[in-house]
Image (spheres, rainbow, N blue to C red):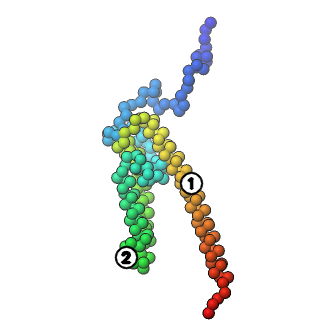
Amino acid sequence: MPTDDIDNQADTPSTWPPPIYPDDVEPENTSGTNTTVPVEVSTIRWNWGAFLGGPFWAMFNGLINYFWCFAGLGAVGGLLAFGAFGSFYSALYVLPAEILTCFVLDLWLRCQLATKGTSESWKRLHRPKGVQGFLTEQAVWSRVMASVTIVSTILLIRFVYYLVLGIQSIIRAFQSLPASH
């Protein structure tokens, strides 16, 4: 009795997602060797995980020099925000320009990570799971960092809303007090 191809296909398990390479033949894993970057990795134009994760993505993806740049920007921005450089009056004039400079540098570093960080991370850190594992890992970074950004934004909006409500109630309470002469 002849068997149909349909019956044979039902017995073979299918894999999802399908592999990038035919016949499950993946090229040599060159990650961590500071040599060539596979086409699949080098064609990633923008990495949202790197942009939104910034210093955390850099630290966990082997780009420690970017991490220290973010740490330096945070330290300088923090010192400027607390007026460690000069008096209170000079901080009123210098502070906005310095903080804007730190913000622009932070944004520039994040854009560098988003555009070039993926290839650099492939070169510097060994990936035992190869290209497919690396691409999956970067997709997870993007989803996690997008979720963290959305939740943080919602919490920040709620905090500012309740802060404004609290300040308004304090102002109304002071305005209802009798004036003393």
Q: Quadrant of the C terminus?
A: bottom right
Quick one: quadrant of the N terminus? Answer: top right
Q: Position of residue 32 (x, y in %)?
A: 34, 40
At x 58%, y 59%, the residue is: 155
Residue holding disc 1: 150
Q: How many marks are shown on the rendered structure?
A: 2
> Which numbered dot is residue 86?
2
Where is residue 116 drawn, in percent x and y? 39, 48
Q: Position of residue 40 (x, y in %)?
A: 43, 38
With 131 as the anchor, is 150 left or right in this view?
right
Q: Are marks 2 and 1 in contact (CB under 8 Å)?
A: no
- Regarding residue 39, the answer to whether it shows in the image is no
Residue 145 rendering spot, x and y as whole percentages = 51, 50
* Mark 2 vs 1, N-terminal side: 2
Instruction: Say which residue appears at 48% left-offset and 39% top-offset.
Output: 136
Please give the name of the residue rendered at 39% of the width and 31% of the height, measured from the top-left corner: 27
Q: Mark 2: few, some, or many residues within 10 Å (few <14, many ≥20)? A: few
- Amino acid identity at mark 1: Ile
Q: Residue at x 65, y 82 (%)?
A: 175
Above or below, 126 relative to 175: above
Q: Secondary structure at mark 1?
A: helix
Please state which of residues 101 and 84 is positioned toward the viewer in this rendering: 84
